[in-house]
Amino acid sequence: MSDRATAQSPPALTRWEQRAEGPLFVASLLFLLGYATRVLAPHHAEPWRGLSLVLVGVTWLLFVIDYAIRIRLSGLGHRFVRVHWLDTLVLILPLLRPLRVVKVYTAVQKRRDKPRLSLYARVMSYAGMTSLLLGFSAALAIYHLEHNAPGASIRTFGDAVWWACATLTTVGYGDVVPVTPVGRIVAAGLMACGLALLGAVTGSFSSWLIQTFRREDEKVPPAGG
Amino acid sequence: MSDRATAQSPPALTRWEQRAEGPLFVASLLFLLGYATRVLAPHHAEPWRGLSLVLVGVTWLLFVIDYAIRIRLSGLGHRFVRVHWLDTLVLILPLLRPLRVVKVYTAVQKRRDKPRLSLYARVMSYAGMTSLLLGFSAALAIYHLEHNAPGASIRTFGDAVWWACATLTTVGYGDVVPVTPVGRIVAAGLMACGLALLGAVTGSFSSWLIQTFRREDEKVPPAGG
Amino acid sequence: MSDRATAQSPPALTRWEQRAEGPLFVASLLFLLGYATRVLAPHHAEPWRGLSLVLVGVTWLLFVIDYAIRIRLSGLGHRFVRVHWLDTLVLILPLLRPLRVVKVYTAVQKRRDKPRLSLYARVMSYAGMTSLLLGFSAALAIYHLEHNAPGASIRTFGDAVWWACATLTTVGYGDVVPVTPVGRIVAAGLMACGLALLGAVTGSFSSWLIQTFRREDEKVPPAGG
Amino acid sequence: MSDRATAQSPPALTRWEQRAEGPLFVASLLFLLGYATRVLAPHHAEPWRGLSLVLVGVTWLLFVIDYAIRIRLSGLGHRFVRVHWLDTLVLILPLLRPLRVVKVYTAVQKRRDKPRLSLYARVMSYAGMTSLLLGFSAALAIYHLEHNAPGASIRTFGDAVWWACATLTTVGYGDVVPVTPVGRIVAAGLMACGLALLGAVTGSFSSWLIQTFRREDEKVPPAGG
């Protein structure tokens, strides 16, 4: 949806974005790793908990720097916050960074001569990968928010992952559910994003399957049966 | 579905509809605000409860007046009730008004030179916005109907919103569910409308994603990799 | 899927089918009415229970006669059972009759000059109507099978309808669920049929919405904004 | 997705695959039968339990031999494991074999002159059949893993099948759910595969229905109403 805005962006910004996307993606994986260590490490595992805090802080700083550079290069000033609302959201909630994977994907793609996978396979792999990363982020956040809440049913990280699976696929058993208000807001976000992404996976798979079967049809007749 | 009927409607009716849609949309938001205040305000918050009742009454009156004017202008007489059944339904159950957002959207669109968003983005934003308003209305109605029922699991407005999220996305955890007959009828309505609307969001997102990836394909080759 | 078979069917059979579909549809509604009365009437409401049994018996007999006539006219002999497997299934389980609504619809359509509704609206109304009838049939069957079972959560017909809504829309709260083996088989059937039908409703609605928005696009430019 | 790889495969490999697919499919059904007997037979039913173990072992050996032959014929060496990752996965987890049904289907198709079913009907039957086999495999595995676990809600094979139905259709009542970690991993796999496959069934059915209604449109006008 920020397509149009990108089309108008000055070349310096485009160059920066192409160069920075790779490192930023690595940074966002490191952020996730740091957050995961912070959330999952036991309270007395001090060296790791300190390190993870540093990792989270440093990577977040990188995101802020990138955002500042892009405001400067875009020449949009204050309007940048509103025009690139997805980037702004992702700066405030770095756990949503996986949503920007599509840009990394495109950047990687541009360096190759031709796409390795068919259109539907690429949509499936993009949407599937994003779902996976988002689901993992949500499981971390939910575990963080819920596991000490009174009356919580999500008590272990395994429960949180199981809950994320059941939510992303809209199965929703309801054996483990978030009970805190913030946990429920995170869950609602996961439902909304996840539903759209998984719909994309399902739709692409369906289209791919129909295409495969149609191609078989075309192959058979010339072979004379 | 009332497409054909609109095509045959006299110009006076079309003009009225174009002029009235904006104010009526504002009125429907005020209705929702009034109803929300009525439902959510504590029983002793008297000045607000009285005001909200007035707001609900006045906006409803506006809807009735608009309906009467449109019957007159259409020249259909009694048949109007049946031909424009969606309008009739929306008059009786003003909480369903958000379903008519598409008309407002079109009216707003006509005043601009060209659409600001691509086709799929518009379908997504329309269906998403309608889902949001419908979900909020349903949460209000369910809270109203359920929170004092014996054996109810929906006790706070937060529970009702959480239930509406889980229902609209068809996750359906079942940790909070309506138990009264009227509450269940409202819930069934939300399931039916919400499912179709969210299917539209999902389908458009999927199409948009495929389109985006396809466009990337076309951009890459001329650039010579 | 019995399309090809129909294409080869002798003219006498086609004529019979066109003439019989209307009355058979009425008969299937009467069957449903009889079954509903049988299931829902209290045990001591003797005159009604007897009448409903007669109604069920007579309408079933009509289905058998129609099936026999069609075997005769088709000239397929024993193969008819296999080729027209849907008809055979529907003879044995008359509650599935709604699935054949599409034929009635086509028959009715043929008598008119042109379809009253657009393509997507027709698919939606067909699939929606079939879902409704199937859901009602399933609710009746489930209530019949479950309401006296030990440990049942479906105790009233209202519960059964509520369960059918939650199942057809794949929300699946799980507050009321079938517990008997036969009830679960009926439920699995409803899930399978319902999912496909509701997918058709959702898909058509999504396509219809995209089409509507696209048409608006085309209308706007010639008007010069 | 292994389409491209297949396109480059040497003729000897293609010939082998065409010849072996039929027998391997029979072997995978026998494997399933053996596994089912092993899981479902009571502990003291010794002759059957021994036989089923032999059946599982022999069929698995066949899969290994086929895999080895295909590595040899492909001339890919170590890369075969990565390029044909689906085949590798299916060798390690033979319960996923049904996923390869599409190849069998294509092989069978090639021997006929023309397809017996329309495109959408074939996609539906393929995806439906695969869902059925996968669901049955998952029910067996879940029953195996869960029925003796402490606090398990899946206690009988009937429960496991009921759970598989509710999961594949994303209804997810949550009355019976896996509680062991391995059981939950199997369940997550079923959700992912099943969702995509059932999406294909739904999508194809929707397309087929729209196509059928469109065809009726085209038939009606020339008949002059």
Image (tube, coloured by chain):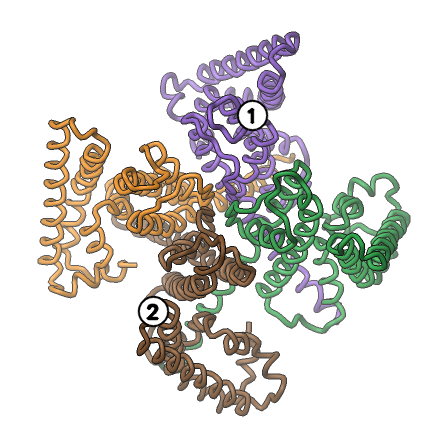
Chain colours: A orange, B brown, C green, D purple
Q: Residue at x 53, y 59 (%)?
A: B180
Q: Which residue is mark 2?
A: B41
Which label sits in the foreground, 2 or 1?
A: 2
Above or below for B16 versus D163: below
Looking at the rendered structure, the number of numbered marks drawn on it comes to 2
Q: Look at the numbered disc 1 and give the secondary structure of its residue.
A: helix
Q: Position of residue B113 (x, y in %)?
A: 32, 77
Looking at the picture, how far across and down is residue A139, in whole percent? 31, 39
Q: Residue at x 63, y 17 (%)?
A: D41
Q: Element at badge 2?
A: loop
Instruction: Tell me if residue B51 can be seen.
Output: yes
Q: Which residue is mark 1?
A: D140
Residue B98 as seen in the image, left or right of residue C184:
left
Callout 1, which amino acid?
Answer: Leu
Q: Are marks 2 and 1 on the same chain?
A: no
Name the quadrant of the C terminus of chain D. Answer: bottom right
To which chain does the residue with label 1 belong?
A: D
Q: CA distance from mark 2 to mark 1?
A: 53 Å
Q: Residues within 10 Å of mark 1 (few under 14, many from 20)?
A: many
On screen, B114 above or below C168? below
